[in-house]
Amino acid sequence: MSGMSEKSMRQFQTSSPEETELLGQKIGARLKGGEVLALFGGMGAGKTVLTRGIARGLGVAEGVSSPTFALVHEYDGRLKIYHFDMFRVESWDDLYSTGFFDFLDSGAVLIVEWSENIENALPESAVRIRLAPGRTERERVISIEGMEL
């Protein structure tokens, strides 16, 4: 468990997509630029819903969708946002082709879905956000490591 003391972890429980989006909004409101938000969680876990909230917290009103086929979507809010989908990334070559490394020092906020697939490439400073199912279909347990909320 080394390193756990430096990075605080908080857990949140949401009972609807709307609440998940509101949590995202709180995250987005606190961002200063240059953060990498690494999202972990299976299909349907709420990653895009959370991202929509984060974007809203940064002043992006609408149009946030999963970048599954484009691999990366760009949004302009209070800060520039690059929203990645790493679902199909299986190698370093795949990762380079997404442009991920080019955006790391851009000062933009990077939101990375399917971070499981690029765990070794994530910067140490990445905020790790894990989304897991709750007791009901609409509930989510969301843990956030590396960011004060």
Image: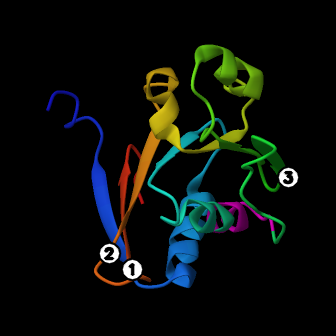
Percent coordinates x, y for residue 108 in the rendering: 73, 38
Q: Residue at x 63, y 62 (%)?
A: 48
> In the image, what residue type sits under mark 3?
Asp
Q: Which residue is mark 2?
A: 134
Q: Earlier in the sequence, mark 3 or mark 2?
A: 3
Q: Are marks 1 and 2 in contact (CB under 8 Å)?
A: yes
Residue nearer the viewer, 96 or 69: 69
Q: Are marks 3 and 2 in contact (CB under 8 Å)?
A: no
Q: CA distance from mark 1 to mark 3?
A: 30 Å
Bounds of the magenta segment: 53-60
> In the image, what residue type sits under mark 2?
Gly
Residue nearer the viewer, 70 or 58: 70
Residue nearer the viewer, 82 or 47: 47
- Specify whether residue 132 is painted magenta: no
Q: Nearer the viewer, mark 3 or mark 2?
A: 2
Mark yes or no: residue 126 visible. Answer: no
